[in-house]
Amino acid sequence: MIWLLLVSIVWAFSFGLIKGRLTGIDPSLVACIRVLLALLVFLPFFRPRGLRGRDALTLVAIGAVQFGLMYVAYIASFRQLAAYEVVVMTIFTPLFVSLLAEGPGRAWRAWSLPAAAVATVGAGIVVMGRPLESVPWTGVGLIQLSNIAFAAGQVAYRKWKHKHAGVSDARVFALLYAGAVLATLPWALPAIGTIPSIDTGQWLTLLYLGVIASGLCFFLWNFGAARTAAGPLAGGEQP
């Protein structure tokens, strides 16, 4: 549980960086660069020996959803929503974790109800704070897609790890980031030509987000998620 709390604190500083420092860079390119940097961090730890091909493909697929699809939708939502609105909308993630981990019949326990109430009120603030015709429905849809992808990925990894308790997380985690790169690269390719226009400050921001907020923190999040009950796990939000 301590890993989840630590990561949540680090992620709290990422929202403003994405909205304030990376404006003007294609969202899909930002997503691809972040997961590529994360992959480079964990490649030295990769040890495929003894890992079955089916398990490797499973981990690649999990990473493609949890980090790849999630980031493409998440970062794109900043074009439609203010940073605080993105924060509010990520509160829905605990509900998706609950539903995916335990099913509709068991998800609505006491600790889920406050999260549902906060999420509903927060979404209402975003929607009702504007005239109906100006509500950023595209942004709302993108952030919910991001929430579902992040929830599905962490639940899937938790289940996989429980079946492979003897496998070190660090040894295989590069596969998840490889899946994320494969998922984000097609979306980022049209913007590859804009890379020279990224300034030094933006590269430093991307380096921090890719190595720390993505690389280290996603590893610690899934490491903690695999060792935490579904209830506490549902408290997380993506950066």
Image (cartoon, rainbow, N blue to C red):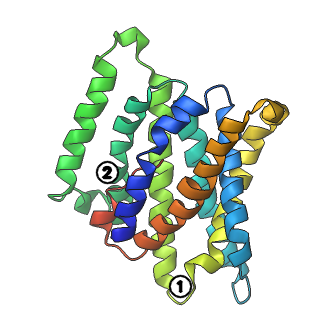
Label annotation for residue 200: none
Residue 231 at x, y percent in the picture = 27, 64
On screen, residue 73 above or below 56: above
On screen, residue 157 versus residue 231, left or right, reads right
Task: Choose the circle earlier in sequence order: 1 or 2.
Answer: 2
Residue ID at (74%, 88%): 49
Residue that carries the numbered disc 2 in the rendered image: 95
In this rendered view, identify the residue nearer to me: 186 or 170. 170
Residue under the point 35% across and 12% down: 132
| Kind of residue sitting beneath label 2 | Leu
The kind of secondary structure element at disc 1 is loop
Q: Residues within 10 Å of mark 1 (few under 14, many from 20)?
A: few
Q: Quadrant of residue 216?
A: bottom right
Query: Does the rendering let one see residue 55?
Result: yes
Judging from the image, what secondary structure is the residue with disc 2 in?
A: helix
The residue most toward the front is: 200
Q: Is residue 28 visible?
A: no
Residue 64 picture location, percent across and down: 63, 56
**Residue 130 horizontal side relative to residue 111, left or right:** right
Q: CA distance from mark 1 to mark 2?
A: 26 Å
Q: Residue at x 62, y 69 (%)?
A: 59
Q: Is residue 49 left or right of residue 233?
A: right
- Residue 136 in the image: x percent, y percent? 45, 20
Quarter containing the N terminus: bottom left
Foreground of the two, 76 or 69: 76
Q: Which x, y percent locates residue 188?
A: 75, 39
Q: Are marks 1 and 2 in contact (CB under 8 Å)?
A: no
Q: Is residue 127 above or below residue 46?
A: above
Q: Which residue is mark 1?
A: 164
Instruction: Kindly identify the amino acid type of the residue bearing the numbered disc 1.
Output: His
